[in-house]
Amino acid sequence: MKNNENFPNWGISLEEIPLEGLNFAFEDLSDFGKDLKVLKPFSGNLKLIKRGFEVVVEGHISGSVELSCDRCLENFEYNIDEDFKVLLLPKNTLNLQEEKELTSEDLEVSFYESSFISFFNILQEEIFLALPYRNLCKENCKGLCPHCGTNLNAETCECFKIKKGSPFAVLKNLINTKEKNL
Ligand SMILES: [Zn+2]
Ligand SMILES: [Zn+2]
């Protein structure tokens, strides 16, 4: 499968999944919608096993996306290299209570509609799940100076330096004395 205008419709109907299962590799996928800027196109494999109306999907996906750092706002590359296993259930056969019980189990649960298993949706969901909770270009990113906006990873600014003889210097001495006495 390569990117083309049919990519979002890439998938298989339930009836088409053979009894012995389906196993295939994919590569060079980069168009997962405008919310994901792909830097290294995604490749990996998918394995589908059908059990009645349930489908177990196992796979691996690797590639990278561009994220924007929450602290310094610089763009950075985020690598994704994930194994996953999802249980797919038909959407319309479940009531809310059943959905609740299923999703509280360890296994990741997702739903398919109209007997169609969308490979596009499965992979897109896995990419979003693999994204970090907080976007940080590096763990110890110093961020931007809240006063002048300097990127403190690259440069320093004078905003919060304490000048000799200023009222803040006196305050600093007081704090130092206090710390010594503790
Ligand atoms: Zn940063
Ligand atoms: Zn500053």
Image (cartoon, helix red, strand yellow):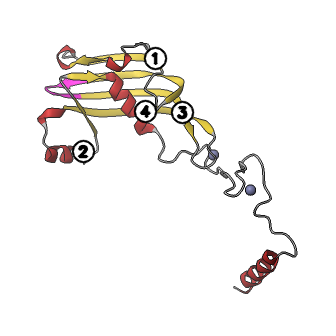
Up-down relation of residue 61 to residue 172 (above or below): above
| Mark 4 residue type | Ile
Residue on which disc 4 sits: 127
Label 4 environment density (alpha carbons within 10 Å; few <14, some 14–19, many ≥20): many
Residue closer to the observer: 31 or 138: 31
Label 2 and label 3: CA atoms lie apart by: 27 Å
Q: In terms of secondary structure, where does tag 3 sit?
A: strand
- Residue at figure coordinates x 42%, y 36% from the top left: 128
Inspect the image, locate mark 2, and give the three-letter code of the amino acid beneath it: Thr
Q: Which residue is mark 3?
A: 79
Which residue has dot 2 on it? 103
When asked about the image quadrant of residue 93, the answer is top left
- Which residue does the numbered mark 1 point to in the structure image? 27
Separation of marks 4 and 2 at Cα, in angstroms? 19 Å
Mark with earlier residue (3, 1): 1
Which SS type dominates the magenta stretch? strand
* The one of 97 and 4 positioned closer to us in this rendering: 4
Q: Point out the stretch of residues depicted in magenta.
A: 49-55
Q: Is residue 11 left or right of residue 2?
A: left
Q: Nearer the viewer, residue 127 or 108?
A: 127
The answer as to whether callout 3 falls within 8 Å of ligand 1 is no
Say what amino acid the circle numbered 1 marks. Glu
Percent of width and height locating residue 82: 44, 33
Sequence-first disc among 1 and 4: 1
Q: Residue furthest bottom?
A: 181
**Residue in the image at 80% along x and 59% along y:** 158
Residues marked 4 and 2 touching at CB (< 8 Å):
no
